[in-house]
């Protein structure tokens, strides 16, 4: 039996060896997402098999995306309500939409184009946000994407920008909001984005240690700051419960639909958590280092199997 973590209603068994990879394969994980069939899609920093797909027991199903110069810095994966797979390529500044089997459907952004935020085009450092002098349009090292119920798309643009961008379902640009800073509506490395049941846009404002909430027009609503440290990504289940992977602490936080802390667990050795998703059984999948640590190269998919009372 694996380690038991969490508390009360949110208690889980931790499984670090969940993914059963083909012999000889490595899967240094950047992000993870789950489709409507509970298939788990792992976006990983290899060129041979950057997208690996598993069933919920961790059995390998198939892989795609290899053999092409499509990815330089694999960053995030999001599965939309139609089970299309969005991959965020940070350094090429593109967000690409694929079918579940890897057919390319659409791209947001122009490969290699970086908007003018004052960061040199050859600066790909992960702390570029510290040197921002202004925000700009799409994109400069983007981080995440989400689709609203009406099909509009929202992109967090964070490492060398401080904005959220809004597009139509066809990829037509609508508007942007955000600027560098610590005040209400300001952002320091917006690293992930989600839409809740009230239609609010939740932004993981990583280096401000908070989640900020906006209307879909960009109006600031509120912030949640219940002791999180560097929230990297956020996802919600069907009941509106909010799950947060904390990059800068190595913790997972579970919040109510209004941002109250319900449970929290983790360790500094899991620091650099980078993605989180919840399946239909309310089990969690987290892109994080395991008990042996390992930082960026040691990330794997850790499954947290929910324990029923």
Image (cartoon, rainbow, N blue to C red):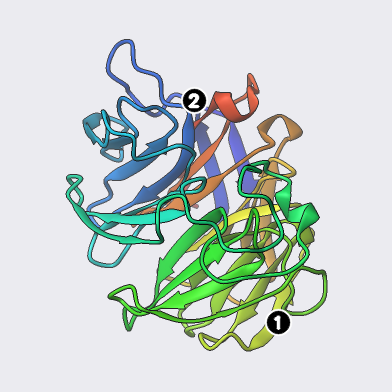
Note whether residue 302 is visible: no
Query: Considering depth in this image, is 83 or 68 the residue closer to the camera?
Result: 68
Crowd rating for badge 2 (residues with CA inside 10 Å; few <14, some 14–19, many 20+): few
Q: Farthest residue in the top direction?
A: 24
Number of the front mark, 2 or 1: 1
- Counting from the top left corner in percent of width and height, residue 133 is at 78, 64
Give residue 242's quadrant in the image: bottom right
Residue 240 lies left or right of residue 210; in this view the side is left
Going from the N terminus, do you reach mark 2 or mark 1 first?
2
Pointers 2 and 1 in contact (C-beta within 8 Å): no
Dot 1 lies on which element? strand
Residue 226 lies left or right of residue 168; in this view the side is right
- Counting from the top left corner in percent of width and height, residue 88 is at 43, 51
Note whether residue 199 is visible: yes
Query: Considering depth in this image, is 129 or 45 the residue closer to the camera?
Result: 129
Q: CA distance from mark 2 to mark 1?
A: 41 Å
Q: Which mark is residue 151?
A: none
Q: Farthest residue in the right direction?
A: 182
Residue, x 50% and y 48% (percent of image)?
Answer: 90
Give residue 180's quadrant in the image: bottom right
Residue, x 46% and y 50% (percent of image)?
Answer: 112
Q: Which residue is mark 2?
A: 1
Count numbered badges in the picture: 2
- Counting from the top left corner in percent of width and height, residue 264 is at 68, 51
Dot 2 lies on which element? loop
- Counting from the top left corner in percent of width and height, residue 192 is at 56, 60
């Amino acid at each position: 039996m694996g380690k038991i973590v969490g508390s009360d209603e949110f208690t889980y068994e931790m499984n670090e060896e969940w993914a059963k990879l083909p012999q000889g394969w490595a899967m240094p994980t950047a992000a993870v997402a789950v489709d409507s069939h509970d298939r788990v899609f792992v976006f990983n920093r290899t060129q041979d098999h950057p997208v690996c797909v598993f069933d919920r027991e961790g059995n390998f199903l198939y892989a795609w995306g290899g053999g092409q110069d499509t990815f330089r810095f694999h960053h995030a994966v999001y599965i939309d309500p139609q089970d299309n797979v969005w991959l965020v390529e940070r350094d090429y500044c593109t967000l690409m939409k694929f079918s579940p089997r890897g057919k390319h459907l659409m791209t947001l952004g122009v490969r290699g184009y970086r908007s003018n935020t004052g960061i040199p085009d050859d600066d790909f450092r992960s702390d570029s946000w510290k040197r921002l002098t202004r925000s700009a349009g799409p994109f400069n090292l983007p981080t995440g994407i989400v689709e609203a119920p009406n099909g509009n798309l929202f992109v967090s643009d964070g490492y060398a920008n401080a904005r959220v961008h809004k597009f139509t379902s066809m990829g037509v640009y609508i508007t942007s909001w955000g600027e560098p800073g610590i005040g209400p509506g300001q952002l320091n490395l917006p690293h992930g984005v989600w839409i809740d049941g009230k239609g609010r846009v939740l932004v993981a404002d990583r280096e401000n240690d908070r989640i900020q909430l906006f209307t879909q027009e960009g109006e600031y609503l509120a912030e949640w700051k219940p002791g999180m440290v560097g929230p990297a990504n956020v996802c919600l289940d069907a009941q509106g419960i909010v799950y947060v992977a904390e990059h800068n602490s190595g913790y997972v936080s579970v919040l109510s639909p209004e941002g109250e802390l319900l449970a929290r667990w983790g360790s500094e050795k899991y620091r650099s958590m980078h993605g989180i998703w919840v399946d239909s059984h309310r089990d969690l999948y987290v892109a994080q280092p395991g008990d042996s640590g390992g930082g960026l190269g040691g990330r794997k998919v850790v499954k947290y199997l929910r324990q029923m009372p």
